[in-house]
Image (cartoon, grey):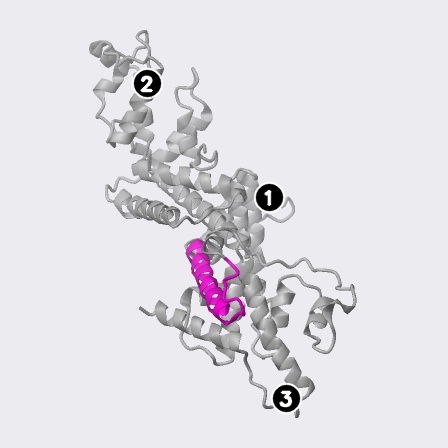
Amino acid sequence: MPLLAGALDAPSQAYGSLGAFEFVSMALVFAAELAIRIRSKDIRHSVRYYAPMSVRAAKEEAQFASWNDRKIAFPHLLQQVTDSAYTHRGLIIDRPFSHARYAKMRMLTSEHLFCGLQNDYPRAVWTPEIRDEVMMGLEARNVANGIGDRSARQVAAARYILPPQDGDFLRNTIPTLRAKLSLVHLLLREEMELGFANLSPQIFAIAHLYNCFQKRGWISGLWPELELIMDRHSKKIFSTAIPTKPDEFYSRLLLVAGYSTTFIKKTRNTDKDIYSSRDFGKATHKTCELEPLPMTKILRDYVHQRETGVRTWYRMDEEMAKHSKVSSRTQGSGDLNISSFIKELRNSKELPQVLDHLEFDYISLTLQCNELCEKIDTEQAQLSATGGKIHKEADWKSPTSDGFMIVATLLGDLDRVVMKKKRNPKGDMDMADTTNAVDAVIRVMQGFLDGLKK
């Protein structure tokens, strides 16, 4: 998968065109002036800001390798963003700028003033794999390692500006490049992870089951990652306030999943057959999909180049104004005041909130929820007449909505007990609050929560 067109900052994109034409554009002159003004001379700057990004990308590569070993299946629908994220991580980890530059210099023909320039520059830091790949590519094009005329190159160098000796010069000196690489890295990661979580909506379902058991006092201990998601995506998962009453848990799950109120009333009516009438009402627009922050959507459109940079600024200003009630647009013309916009952006809580959300690992939490659903399925199988599991182990390693159905069945069983007691409080007071199947699941979840403490 090629690198995203919007993956690099504007100065780096401008430098990428250097040498492609016989003239130097004004955009390149502006980029050079900008680079001179903003570049960092602190040699530790890269260690402080680029090294953590490289370490993170390397850890993610190891994480994906472990998921591959466990045969976790990534759906075809996410292939494009998954491949883009893989390419971008490779750019951060391998730093191919110096390797590509070596190949460019070596491809200069014998007639070129700087033929053999690659021999005057420090060799790139090669891994055996990258060296073999680059050399094989050059050999396939019949590119020889030209020697050229060193003294002629020195004469030419006095007339022309040569590239810096450091192959990672831009990365080490221009903060905007590191910032853009980091931003795109995080945005692609979250886009891929949210897509994975939404194709297997176990986080959504388990949040409802966990909340039910917790509010009814049947489990102890906390699940920090799930609690965080329940807080951040509360409106999407629970619609309004988080349900607390026994007769709210099942109906709220169905409501936020998009079922009609007609269907919910019929399915909760224990006195009638749900299929006695074919009128199930019209489903709503609600889904089990978790969503990114509005500001994240704006930034996604920017890095995927669905929006221009200027249009992105206007959209960001509109989003910030919803919270601060302050717009950076000038009165009358409605043009954006850039100085005011940058000041508001620095003072706004929107970007820190976005970055905090982008750090969350949705895939690992989804796999944890899948693991819990598999344990619940195994426990329920022991209570069934056949004793056989409904789902295979491999089912929980691919996109599936089976976890939602398991949770809906459990909450439905509990709701029927609640509704029976409500309709006939005197006759059904001795009825247990749970069923054997629910008791088994409570034990499974408590064991799971206890395991998180270890």
Q: Nearer the viewer, mark 2 or mark 1?
A: 2
**Quadrant showing the C terminus:** bottom left
Marks 1 and 3, how far apart at CA: 68 Å
- The amino acid on which the numbered mark 1 sits, given as a three-letter code, is Asp
Question: Mark 1 — residue?
Answer: 335
Q: Residue placed farthest to the bottom in the image? A: 426
Q: Tell me the residue that label 2 is attached to.
A: 138
User: How far separated are the C-alphas under marks 2 and 3?
Assistant: 82 Å
The x and y percentages for residue 288 are 58, 59
Secondary structure at badge 2 equals helix
- Residue 399 at x, y = what percent? 52, 51
Residue most extreme to the front: 386
Location of the N terminus by quadrant is top left
| Cβ atoms under marks 2 and 3 closer than 8 Å | no
Of badges 1 and 3, the one in the foreground is 3
Label 1 element class: loop
What residue does disc 3 label?
428
Q: Which residue is found at the position 35% from the left and 39% from the top? A: 92
Q: Is residue 352 visible?
A: no
- Residue 84 falls within the magenta-colored stretch: no
Would you say 378 lies left or right of 413 here?
left
Is label 2 or label 3 in front? 3
